Amino acid sequence: MKNLMFCFGFLMLISFVGCGLKDASFSNYFKADKIYKIVPSSNYDAKDESDAVKLLPIDLESGFIHVAFGNQVEKILKKFFTGIDNVLVLELDQNVLAENGIEMRKERNNPGGDSFPHLYGKQQISVKAVASVINVEEMIDGSWSIVKH
């Protein structure tokens, strides 16, 4: 019985440590020089070539599209997508966006705060501008993980 309890405790420790490793690889997965649009999966339709991403209310209200640099993705997920299932992180191709009349500007939301990328111009993102689609899920501890298929 002691051996069984020891094995169970050891397995729990390994799974706990494994979660920490998963979190570290998650934050390193996204590149700081790339931009990402985070949306519920229902807001992305690869079949709609000209308007593949249904914008969020905050995008429509502010007059620009909110996106994030790679080092901001996890922070944005934790702040705005907690409790939402089936979330996608869309890596966007800045060259394709520019070709479609969309300008990226780095702006601070608050004086002295972080600079975030904002997209101005057309209020739509074509499927050609989506370089990759990454499925993510929220873990029990509030961290986020990439869903492998």
Image (cartoon, rainbow, N blue to C red):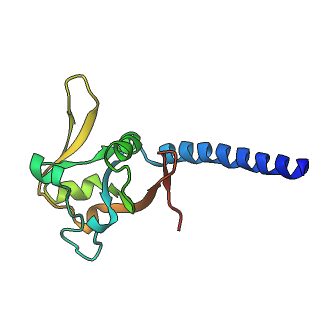
Residue at the location (13% across, 56% down)?
A: 101
Q: Is residue 63 visible?
A: no
Could you say which is closer to the camera, residue 98 or residue 47? 47
User: Horizontally, is 116 left or right of 27 in the view?
Assistant: left
Q: Percent from the top left, x then y, of residue 36?
A: 33, 51
Residue at far front of view: 1
3, above or below 90, in the image: above
Could you say which is closer to the camera, residue 96 or residue 15? 15
Residue at the location (18% across, 58% down)?
A: 99
Residue at the location (17% across, 49% down)?
A: 58
Q: Percent from the top left, x then y, of residue 73?
A: 38, 45
Query: Image quarter for residue 125?
Result: bottom left
Residue at far bottom of view: 47
Q: Is residue 66 visible?
A: yes
User: Horizontally, is 136 left or right of 56 in the view?
Assistant: right
Q: Percent from the top left, x then y, of residue 102?
A: 16, 53
Tally the numbered discs: 0
Residue at far top of view: 112
User: Horizontally, is 139 left or right of 6 in the view?
Assistant: left
Q: Percent from the top left, x then y, of residue 103?
A: 16, 48
